Each structure stands twice: as structure tokens, then as C-alpha cells.
Amino acid sequence: MPKNSNKVNKNTKKETIFKRLAENRYAKFQYEIYEKIEAGIELLGTEVKSIRNGKANLRDGYCTFRNGEILLLNVHISPHKNVGSFFNHDPLRNRKLLLHKKEIIKLKSNTEKKGMTIVPLSIYLKGQWIKITIGIGKGKNLHDKRESEKQKSVRKEMKSALKR
């Protein structure tokens, strides 16, 4: 058998490509994130095309529970340019998140605690699938935000000092 055969060794893992398509930086400033979970999203074809072009905005998005499902609300995905208005999607429609039942129950029990909420953190391409990272977090107070800004600036100064 030749050395350069097309067989794949069972011990090697197939590498998946991660490409970040949209990120919610504001959520990291506004909330203290305790846990992150990867989920799938139920999307229409024109939404997939728009997200791949980077036309998604997660800033005001949040998640809620309805009928044993978790829905992503208030995430704006712009309509696709090359499609007529009849076939295009509503930019602010509710989108179902694809999670296992145990994960949904765990999320629901965590959000029933005082002040906890679920926010979208980023949308990315994992192989050929579009995935979303959601975070369970608690809203920061003004003094917490100031403290995190101070820590961020101190880390930045330390990095610049080490480079010199």
C-alpha cells in the first residue's frame, strides 16, 4: 500500500475551523458572566447568508423561556441584499436555540436566582455550522464597572511595561 493513501488515521482528530462572525463586547462590560454555553440556532437561509457576511448585531439581545424552549430575542440580523423582500426574513424575529433538555433545565434553574440573566456573547462558524455562545450572568453595578475598568487599565499598563 502506498504511503500517501487517502485513508484517515483513527487516532487523528479532524480540526474544525472557528470563525467569529459577531461579538457582544457590551455584554462583558454590562454583566459579570459566570458560565458560558455553546448552542445552535434555528435560522432561515437568508439569515445564514447575512450572518456569514457579518450583518448580525447582538448588543441588545437576551434569552427567555417559552413552552420548554429557549428563545433568542431582540437580536438584529439584517436582511440579505440580493434577495427580494418577499423571500427575506424579519430582522428582529424570535429565534429558537437548539439545546438538550438537560441544558435547558439547568439554564432555567440558574436564571430563577435573583438577578441572573442569559445574554448572547458571540456568533461564530464552527466547521459549516453557525453556533452561538450564551452566557449566564448578573448585571454589574456602577462601582463594579469602574473597578473592572481599573483592572483592565492596570493589566494593559503591565503588558506594555513588560514589552519595553
Image: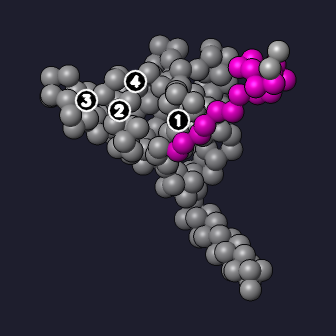
Between circles 1 and 4, the one closer to the viewer is 1
Mark 3 lies on residue: 90
* Disc 3 + disc 4, Cβ < 8 Å: no
Q: Secondary structure at mark 4?
A: loop
Mark 2 lies on residue: 49
* Disc 4 + disc 2, Cβ < 8 Å: no
* Mark nearer the N terminus (3 vs 4): 4
Residue positioned 63% across, 28% down in the render: 107
* Mark nearer the N terminus (3 vs 2): 2
Give the crowd class for mark 4: few <14, some 14-19, many >=20 residues within 10 Å: some
Residue positioned 65% across, 38% down in the render: 36
* Disc 3 + disc 2, Cβ < 8 Å: no
Q: Magenta residues, as a range?
A: 3-20
CA gap between label 3 and label 4 equals: 11 Å
* Mark nearer the N terminus (1 vs 3): 3
Between circles 3 and 2, the one closer to the viewer is 2
CA gap between label 1 and label 4 equals: 13 Å
Give the crowd class for mark 1: few <14, some 14-19, many >=20 residues within 10 Å: some
Question: Residue 35: x percent and y percent?
Answer: 68, 40
* Mark nearer the N terminus (1 vs 4): 4
Viewer-side residue, 113 vs 55: 55
Residue 56 lies left or right of residue 67; in this view the side is left
Which SS type dominates the magenta stretch?
A: loop
Question: Residue 78: x percent and y percent?
Answer: 29, 39
Mark 4 lies on residue: 43
